[in-house]
Image (cartoon, rainbow, N blue to C red):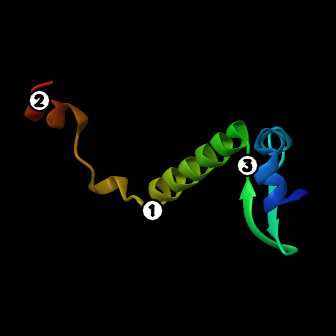
Amino acid sequence: MNSISVSELKTNPASAINKAADIPVAIQNRNKTKAYLVGKELFEKIVAYIENYTDRSVIQKTDFSKGRDFERVAEELGI
């Protein structure tokens, strides 16, 4: 993993963003990691993964035997 200092980030933010395109960049202050900079595509992949994981866990916990017939619900809603 790449790392840069806070002062490097302030001096050249475009360079830091370019470095974070493929892998996270650790932002360090006094040799301690304080934050991570993540590129747009990686961030979107992480969010999609979390959403899919959450959806999967909800589906696994759902008792579909207690569900209602779709056609009945659609009729009640007028759709």
Crowd around label 3: few <14 · some 14–19 · many ≥20 (10 Å): many
Marks 2/1: CA distance? 27 Å
The percent position of residue 20, horizontal first and vertical second, equals 81, 45
- Residue drawn at point x = 11 percent, y = 29 percent: 75
Marks 2/3: CA distance? 47 Å
Establish if 47 lies above or below 35: above
Q: Amino acid at mark 3?
A: Val
Going from N to C along the chain, the mark reached first, 2 or 1, is: 1
The percent position of residue 65, horizontal first and vertical second, equals 32, 54
Q: Are marks 2 and 1 in contact (CB under 8 Å)?
A: no
Most foreground residue, 26 or 54: 26
Mark 3 secondary-structure assignment: loop
- In this picture, residue 59 sits left or right of residue 44: left
Residue that label 1 marks: 61
Most foreground residue, 28 or 42: 28
Q: Which mark is residue 38?
A: 3
Q: Amino acid at mark 1?
A: Lys
- Residue drawn at point x = 78 percent, y = 38 percent: 14
